[in-house]
Image: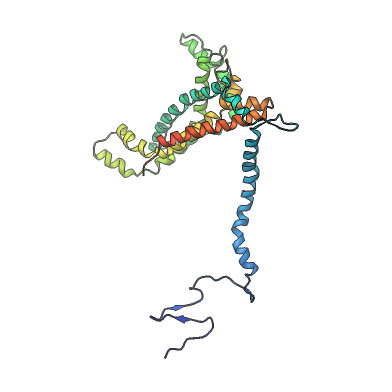
Amino acid sequence: MTTRPTGAATVFRERGAVPVTADTAGPRPVRTRRGRRTPAWWRRRLAPYTFVLPFVAVFLAFSVYPLFFTLRLSFTNWHGTGAAEWVGLGNYRYLLTNGAFWSSLGNSGLLWLLIVPVQLVVSVVVAVLLGAVKRMRGFYRVAFVVPFVTPLAAVAQIWIVLFDQNYGPVNAVLGALGLPPVGWLVTSGWARPTLALLFIWKTTGFVVLIILSGLQQIDRGLYEAASLDGAGRVRQLWSITVPLLRRSLMFSVVLQTLAVFQMFTEPYVVTKGGPYNSTTTAGLFLFNHINRADLGTGAANSFLLVIVVMAASLLFVRLLRAED
């Protein structure tokens, strides 16, 4: 006859001699005599929420509340002082029937066509070359990242000097080659490409880092198998690298789309939105409303811009969606 110990001692299973102690039976909430949980138990339960509480408070105060405040503001006519006048959809109707608003979106769209496709091709080629470099790899990677971390206002001032129509070094080189000077920043045909070149030079290093991170996830055995089948470097790049970089490319396209449609500093410092509003981007057009203290129209403009960028981003995600 097997005796079983009383209390919280060992309890034997009916079959076998494997003891099940209080430690192996899993944690049990500590209760007082009246069945209430102790303060220590409450501290353990509330500790995770205590740690995330500062982030939640900051997120609600500086993200959620401003978002809903701006949404409400977009239905009013308010100039920063006094009571806001409710106008309903008036601000949205004004913008949707305003040619300047559509012109700003068109300028941003043209800049996107000049920037994003070129930048993706350059970034993939540069990332592949950097991945193949054996010596001084860190130096080359830092060299491509330096423009991205350089203050944008300083780079814009340098661009003004380089592309000055009368005294700029770029036109000086063209004159030495026997070519006429070009009004890079004072003609509508050249102002957009000049801004696009500034944006490409400034942000390509960041896109290269994204592509490099995607390259590191590709199995090198795929390239070895392709080389055994007779595939050259260009064929491997097109048939292996590019398809397996779809996720990185999609992420880069979405980020650069947001950056292009929010572009403000480049046209504001370099061209002031000219000539003839040819470089007035969506971001600069939005700033003009804020600068005139037309806060209701500016809030409506910001929400329309969010809708446009979100629709474009979803389209790119759909086109570049990577299959597992």
| Tally of numbered discs | 0
Give the residue at x 50% y 31%: 257
Side of 231 relative to 262 (left or right): left
- Is residue 123 in view from this perspective? yes
Give the residue at x 42% y 78%: 18
Q: Quadrant of residue 158?
A: top right
Q: Nearer the viewer, residue 225 or 188?
A: 188
- Is residue 147 in view from this perspective? no
Q: Position of residue 282 (x, y in %)?
A: 56, 26
Q: Quadrant of residue 215?
A: top left
Give the residue at x 65% y 67%: 39
Q: Farthest residue toward the right?
A: 82
- Indicate whether 99 appears above or below 295: above
Q: Position of residue 301 (x, y in %)?
A: 60, 29
Quarter of the image containing the N terminus? bottom left
Q: Farthest residue toward the left?
A: 229
Q: Nearer the viewer, residue 300 or 47?
A: 300
- Indicate whether 129 appears above or below 13: above
Q: Nearer the viewer, residue 8 or 272?
A: 8
Q: Nearer the viewer, residue 177 or 299?
A: 299
Give the residue at x 43% y 89%: 2
Q: Position of residue 3 (x, y in %)?
A: 46, 89
Q: Quadrant of residue 283?
A: top right
Q: Position of residue 58 (x, y in %)?
A: 64, 46
Q: Farthest residue toward the bottom?
A: 1
